Amino acid sequence: MTNPNPIHPNAGDAGSPATAPTPALSLQDVGYAYTKGGKRVLDHVSHDFLPGRVHAITGPSGAGKTTLLSLICGLAVPTTGRVLHNGADLAGNDRYAYRSRDIGVIFQSFNLLPGLTVEENIILSMDASGRRFDRPKQDIARDLLAQVHLPAEYADERILHLSGGEQQRVAIARALSYDPPIIVADEPTGNLDIATQDDIMAIFRSLAHEQSRCVIIVTHSPEVAAASDEVFELAPLRRRRV
């Protein structure tokens, strides 16, 4: 059985009011196997992800972090249990619309289009969302660059000309481009120096604490976990002898 162990390094005072916000995402007894009747990668996983908080998902290789990320992003559905978005089962909803509008994903390898400019990468994501915007998309893109601590002149730079840390910031801006309430990041600081890592985490905390987004980070980094509001630790399933 998977042994998820929630840890709360930055929890509030014990005497604060007990009222909690409605979860943005909720895992209810989730299990997953890649083949019918095959070995479970996840089993009996339950957890709530709340808006206004930075959640870190940790665990050793083989614990199912990548699989859990796929379920959270709506790329797969659980073999057992449910993933709820605002109380509704994702398996019964339009998961393409969910991925296009409700959740912004920051990939470990960025997945930016190198032949396009920074602004073009951001606007392409806005176009794919199908949303209508009340301002010119170019203006929104440049405002997003300011949010991720990049100067406006970067809008016309080609992705190929940017450092890893700069590409990570662009990837965050792209994920924010259609204003999703949930942000998911896969190892966002894995190849960054400490100063850049700290600044990226400051951006994530601002998105959660100042904009009330639900931020979920999959990480191996103890520093990232310590800077998060909550750590959800996955343990690998024990293999049973037949």
Image (cartoon, grey):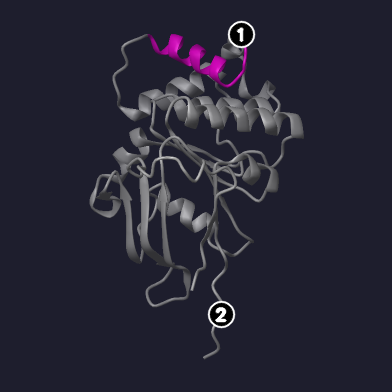
At 23% across and 52% down in the image, what residue appears?
92
Front residue (pair 93, 211): 211
Q: What label sits on residue 133 in the rendered view?
A: none
Front residue (pair 110, 140): 140
Question: Which residues are the magenta region?
Answer: 136-151
At 43% across and 27% down in the image, what residue appears?
125
- Tag 1's secondary structure? helix
* Residue under label 2: 239
Quarter of image, res 217: top right
- 208 is within the stretch colored magenta: no
Q: Report x, y in % for residue 21.
A: 35, 40
User: Which amino acid type is shown beneath numbered disc 2?
Assistant: Arg
* Residue under label 1: 153
Q: Residue furthest bottom?
A: 242
Q: Report x, y in % for residue 238.
A: 56, 77
- 145 is within the stretch colored magenta: yes
164 sits to left or right of 176:
right
Disc 2 packing (10 Å; few <14; some 14–19; many ≥20): few
Quarter of image, res 239: bottom right
47 sits to left or right of 89:
right
